[in-house]
Amino acid sequence: MKYMASYDLMETMRNTNQWLGATALAMASYPAFAAIPNPALNWMAAWGEVTERSFSRMVVKPDWDIPPAVGVDGADHPVLIEKELEGAFGDLVHFVVQGRDAPKRKILLVAPMSGHYATLLRSTVISLIPDADLYITDWHNARDIPVSAGKFDVEDYTLRLVDYMRHLGPDVHVIAVCQPAPLTLAATAYLAEQDPKAQPSSLTLIGGPIDTAASPTEVTDFGHRVNMNQLQEMMIQQVGFQHQGVGRKVYPGLLQLNSFITMNAETHAKAFRDQIMRVAQGVAGDHDKHNKFYDEYLAVMDMPAEFYLSTVQRIFKDNEIGTNSFSIKGQPVDIGKITDVAVKTVEGTKDDISAPGQCIAALNLCTGLPDDKKASHLEDGAGHYGIFAGKSWRENIRPLVLKFIDDNQRTAKATAPKAPAAPASAGKTSIPAQKSTA
């Protein structure tokens, strides 16, 4: 029960701060005070507005909010979000552009399960939709998943990716961003042995910790500084009674958010102070740069405890992918078995999460892959976020990735794609792009 009490205490603190912000805003905005202008009241209202918004975002999944795509006819085509495959821990989501023929490029974008929702890749999605038939992995908040759904660790994650690749067929091109890169590489190697015809046409790994020993960072150092018993005692909690996943052990998103903010505490503190001043001066906007960033950054989700712990143990501590010793259900997964899937790595020179050297290590692990099917790119001046979003991605990296995909197109076989090995509902549900898929 102590783990559940800790979880509810964190949620209580978050809820209290949200209430304090709302209360300060309401009190400072009381109509009678308008007769007596006071800068202190303006500041109080501004503090309340920023505080309420910040703490309320922490428990809300952001909308996809995908704008219409401009077709070759010059017209706007609405984008619908369709759940291609549904599962307890995540869905395979399809971005369907109405009124256009599907592009020849079919891309599966593998989003991280690292504390943020898949919507963190919204700008990446928007940049790819005009040129691709796009799918994405949309992982669920663990606190909303009943205990009866069972466990979900790194092996289950890998097998889920295998299911998605089988479903989409051999003409799909996979792009894995950050945390899922090593497991996506393992899923491809698993298919190379178990079902070679279901392998994707190409695999692009962006800023992923393939070999965590290749170039240490604060993230990899943390994985070695703490032991697993410490992590289990300090980081793992049980979901409280107010959520569907009551009793499930999780690594709470609020704890992860605290870690994110602590890494750059001064920068975040200054950003919030500046935003309070802008609100007080009346120059802030609902969709200004600050709110656009923090509405997404502060929206966090819980991870299944077994996934978090197995990631730390097997990916960071034991470096199973980097040493090619990963296994699924006791069966070794040999990355050297990949022989005809083109592999490209992308890194940024200023990436302080997955430093240069960690991701490109994937090419050395693909011992059975010819050199002409290997490629890499190091983006000068780009940090971790910049290699999949922002100017570096749009102007430099994205064109290179699309060219790599075009150079490695493979026609799908006439046979229908295989159904997922794990039970999943294949019913398709369409919802407007402006609404959340949750």
Image (spheres, grey):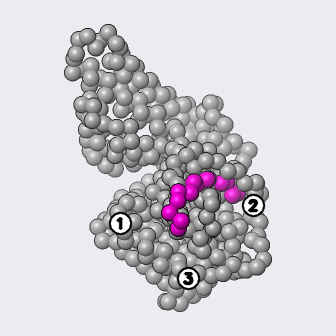
Q: Which residue is tagged 3? A: 408
Numbered tag placed on residue 422 in the rendering: 2
Front-most of residues 431 and 234:
431
Q: Check disc 1 and give the amino acid type.
A: Ser
**Which comes before the other along the chain, label 1 or label 2?**
1
**Residue at 44% of width from left, 28% of height from top?**
18
Query: Do the residues under discs 2 and 3 have CB atoms within 8 angstroms?
Result: no
User: The residue tagged with tag 3: helix, strand or loop?
Assistant: loop
Front-most of residues 17 and 44:
44
State the CA–CA distance, disc 3 to disc 1.
23 Å
Residue stretch in magenta: 72-85
Q: Check disc 2 and give the amino acid type.
A: Ala
| Screen quadrant of the N terminus | top right
Where residue 192 sits, quadrant-wise, is bottom right
Residue 153, horizontal then vertical, whole percent = 62, 57
Front-most of residues 79 and 226:
79
Residue 68, horizontal then vertical, whole percent = 52, 54
**Residue at 34% of width from left, 18% of height from top?**
29
**Does the segment drawn in magenta span residue 424?**
no
Where residue 174 sits, quadrant-wise, is bottom right
Q: Check disc 3 and give the amino acid type.
A: Asn
Q: Which residue is tagged 1? A: 392
Q: Residues within 10 Å of mark 2 (few under 14, many from 20)?
A: few
| Screen quadrant of the C terminus | top right
**Which comes before the other along the chain, label 3 or label 1?**
1
Residue 140, horizontal then vertical, whole percent = 61, 48
41 lies left or right of 165: left
Relative height, residue 48 to residue 33 (above, below): below
User: The residue tagged with tag 2: helix, strand or loop?
Assistant: loop
